[in-house]
Amino acid sequence: MLQPGLMMDRPLLISGIIEHAAAQFGDVEVVSRETHGPLFRYTYAQCAARSHKLANALKGLGLEAGSAVGSIAWNNHRHLEAYFAVSGSGMVMHTCNPRLQAQQLIYIINHAEDAMMLFDSTFAPLIKGIAPYCPKVKSWVCLSDAANMPVIDGVSTLCYEDLIAPHSEQFDWPEFDERSGAALCYTSGTTGNPKGALYSHRAIVINAMSGCLPGILSLSPSDTILPVVPMFHINAWCIPYAAPIGGARLVLPGPRLDGASLYELMEGERVTVSAGVPTIWLALMQHVEEHGLRFSTMKRTGVGGSAMPAALIAKFVDNYGVEVRHGWGMTETTAVATMSCLSPKNRELSATEQHAVIARQGKSVFGTEIKIVDEYGATLPRDGVAQGELMVRGQWIVRSYYKVEASPLVDGWFPTGDIATIDAHGVMQIRDRAKDVIKTGGEWISSIDLENAAVGHPAVAMAAVIGVKHPKWDERPLLFIVRKPGKTVEREEILAFLTERVAKWWVPDDVIFLDALPVGGTGKVQKNDLRKQYGGVFS
């Protein structure tokens, strides 16, 4: 018979994160770039006190445990306070992506049954458009002080600072089952309505703790981290929870995410760690190169959301001394599930070989497991060659979608829709999305690999590849290029460049030059938009 352990059974709750930070790192600074005005500075202790005030305000408005509170907001200190006050009170923090179509926003707000909506003033026009169609939202609260409150015709709004001002800085967080819902995020909904992933306190806390591990983001009191990934996108990859756990100084960038603004903030606040999608780092690198700048304190950055080109990794690592850690996760995995980090043996490789290692999505984080399967569900070998659908399971992986009876799991594993390889050392590499891989003449072409090769050209800023129907070969690749400002490159030159870097039959049939690629709310290129316009038939 198994013997029971004799340890205390204390629940893992989000309220415990901010209380830990206030008690152990109470003087560590949180810096917030505001929607209006200069940078705002306070400490974790002051953040906890204001979270208490908000928790009291929510209770005063009659919100109860289990109520959903939505947000349409940037990364700033008031949004951070809501992260802890809402979930810590036993309610559900529902972060809404403002870049979704209005109809999708209305759908997820109503589907989540949000009782309150917190929003930044920049989104006032959006609120005016959606509020009449969200009847269950009883309170619209602008994350602002009185001086910067917008006037929204037809919408009665509350001022955040006025709302919390009369309330006490003392609040006794309730204790409850750590498996209770804490935060709700919806998928981007590229096909059909978005689906909700309801994260538990347990899932978020464990995932945030993993972010502090040396092989993940390595967060400690020695670091200052700037999460560029939005707090409305998978909870900013759980960094707002991980930073106070690790005692790292936290810098929130607000609405200004262009290369110049990010560089200024990184240098001014002596940021050592950051995290975001590749499109952000492309813009930052372009700004740095154009102005002959250097990074004085940046040590490493986490990247995810889509594949980061090896050429861009090389620039960060070789030219600027910034370590790149490439991760993988999705809405359904709470945040990070795998992460690349160079091993001692990897560091003996050439620079080019190291960049190739970093460009992979890495090993599974403890708490998650991965495998790849063929079309019949059979597990494929870990040889780095066999390609199959990536399956994941673990402590912070969804088992079902919010308000959906049918489970997406297959034999206890979540099917990701990504095509991947896993090598003998457990290193996973995303080869493509199942819907993006191109089948030509019975063979597969990875759109990701083609895009990464194209971005290696010195005149190319961004690239995207889609499969276009072909009367003979089933599908053929079509390449889209965005040139760097002031640079020139033409069709024949880019095709010749690719001929030297990929198999001959991979070379795209044509190249289309665009001023910009369609990018969605999470920073990913919207290939569906490209397919709608250009996905006809090659002659």
Image: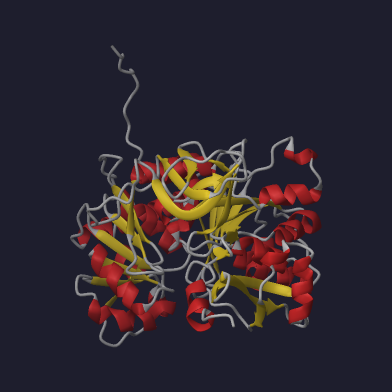
Dividing the picture into quarters, in which one does residue 161 lie? Answer: bottom left
Residue at point 32% right, 85% down? 152
Eyeballing the image, is 137 above or below 399?
below
Taking depth in this image into account, of 258 and 197 the one nearest to the observer is 197
Q: Is residue 505 left or right of residue 195?
A: right
Dividing the picture into quarters, in which one does residue 97 lie? Answer: bottom left
Does the rendering let one see residue 149? no
Taking depth in this image into account, of 165 and 390 the one nearest to the observer is 390
Residue 302: x and y in percent read 60, 53
Eyeballing the image, is 105 above or below 53?
below
The residue sitting at the bottom extreme is: 153
Residue 68: x and y in percent read 26, 60
Eyeballing the image, is 55 above or below 494?
above
How did the renderer colour the structure?
secondary structure
Q: Is residue 59 left or right of residue 28?
A: left
Does the rendering let one see residue 315? yes
Q: Quadrant of the C terminus?
A: bottom right
Residue at point 48% right, 64% down? 435
Residue 57: x and y in percent read 27, 60
The residue sitting at the top extreme is: 1
Taking depth in this image into account, of 31 and 323 the one nearest to the observer is 323
Q: Is residue 438 left or right of residue 510?
A: left
Taking depth in this image into account, of 479 and 367 the one nearest to the observer is 479
Residue 307: x and y in percent read 60, 59
Number of numbered markers = 0
Q: Quadrant of the N terminus?
A: top left
